[in-house]
Image: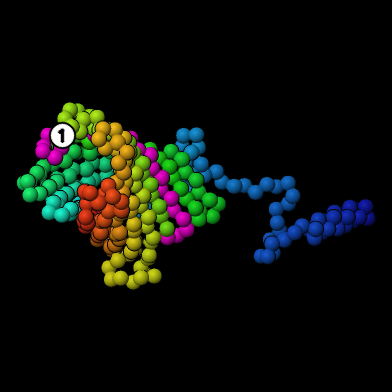
Amino acid sequence: MKMNTAHKLVVGRLTLATAATLLTLPTFADGQAATAPGDAAITPDTRYGLFNGLDHRSWYSQGDFPEPFLVDDSGLEINEARLDWTHLKNGDQHSDTVKAEVEKGFGLLTLELEVPYERDASPDGIVQGIGNIDLGARYPFYQYVSRTGFFDTTFGGAFEAGIPASSAISVNPEFVPKIFNDTKIGDHFTAQTVLGYSTLTGGGPQGNLQTFEYGFTFGYFIEHAQLPLPGVQRFIPMFELIGNTGMNKDASGQNSLTGNACFRLNLKTIGRVQPRLGLGYVFPLNHDARADLHSGIVTSLVFEY
């Protein structure tokens, strides 16, 4: 069908107008037209949880923070079992503690069970037995992740209850509400903080003893590509600060601060299980700590499955 003259003029004007509009739009380097003014970029909402306090991008959800040695664990653990041995020495006195632990995650909630066995030897004799059986739980309540993910921090709350085993080592129940923070900076550095307020109940000289407990764990990830150790996926040099301050009784105001220079080796997986081996050297950092400790070593074997 042939177009008449008026129809041709209309089509020509529309074609010129469309071409002029396309020429005025800015373009990206790949040749695609940029978003026209007024079309706001759509940013996906990553917030969720109570009061939108959590962020889906947070590294905490991966459960990959390094496991501390003497500081309470604060990371998310999905399925984990571990066995630790700590040997502490002060002159002619020394103590050995073997601790078995199991942790299980349900979403972002981590539940834990710890059963320690302690043996204290001195010139006066040997005291030994099962320590308090600890039941614990922790959950994050606020997360912040920078736009690029370079800075990633999580705050949470935890609670621990120590059930006495009625042994020479374990007499008083213990209750410890805690808050924690797990932070990752860049691709390698992590910092974990745990603050708790311990109260021993029951009778005896330790009854109603209250202590402020604090711990800091710093780690630096070195991947296999950077340090190709045989059988090792990740090498993590770590340093811990472990402190407690007496809040009442004869220990009021006394502050003991201990350090632990340590490392973990995340070994290659065996089926679904990844072994993680750790070793640390424990030493006092102030006068109150030196009264109870000269030196010590701690070993830790973790199985994540």
Task: Find the residue positioned furthest to the left.
Answer: 125
Characterize the local packing of mark 1: few (<14), some (14-19) or many (20 or more) Cα atoms within 10 angstroms: many
Residue at 93% over, 52% down:
6
Residue 161, by quadrant, is top left
Q: Nearer the viewer, residue 120 or 15?
A: 120
Q: Nearer the viewer, residue 41 or 62?
A: 62
Residue 158 visible in image: no
Q: In the image, residue 105 lies at what x, y percent?
A: 32, 43
Which region shows up in magenta?
166-188
Residue at 41% over, 45% down:
181
Residue at 9% over, 44% down:
127
Residue 31 visible in image: yes
The amino acid type, in three-letter code, at marker 1 is Val
Q: Name the residue tied to disc 1.
A: 171
How many numbered circles are shown? 1
Q: Nearer the viewer, residue 298 or 11?
A: 298
Secondary structure of the residue carrying tag 1 is loop
Q: Is residue 177 magenta?
A: yes
Q: Is residue 285 left or right of residue 83?
A: right
Q: Is residue 116 magenta?
A: no
Task: Find the residue positioned furthest to the top.
Answer: 203
Task: Find the residue positioned furthest to the right.
Answer: 5
Q: How is the image coloured?
A: rainbow
Instruction: Name the quadrant of the N terminus.
Output: bottom right
Q: Is residue 233 above or below residue 123?
A: below
Residue 131, by quadrant, is top left
Q: In the image, residue 146 lies at what x, y percent?
A: 53, 51
Q: Is residue 148 left or right of residue 191?
A: right
Residue at 10% over, 42% down:
129
Q: In the image, residue 4 lies at what x, y percent?
A: 91, 54
Q: In the image, residue 159 lies at what x, y percent?
A: 31, 36
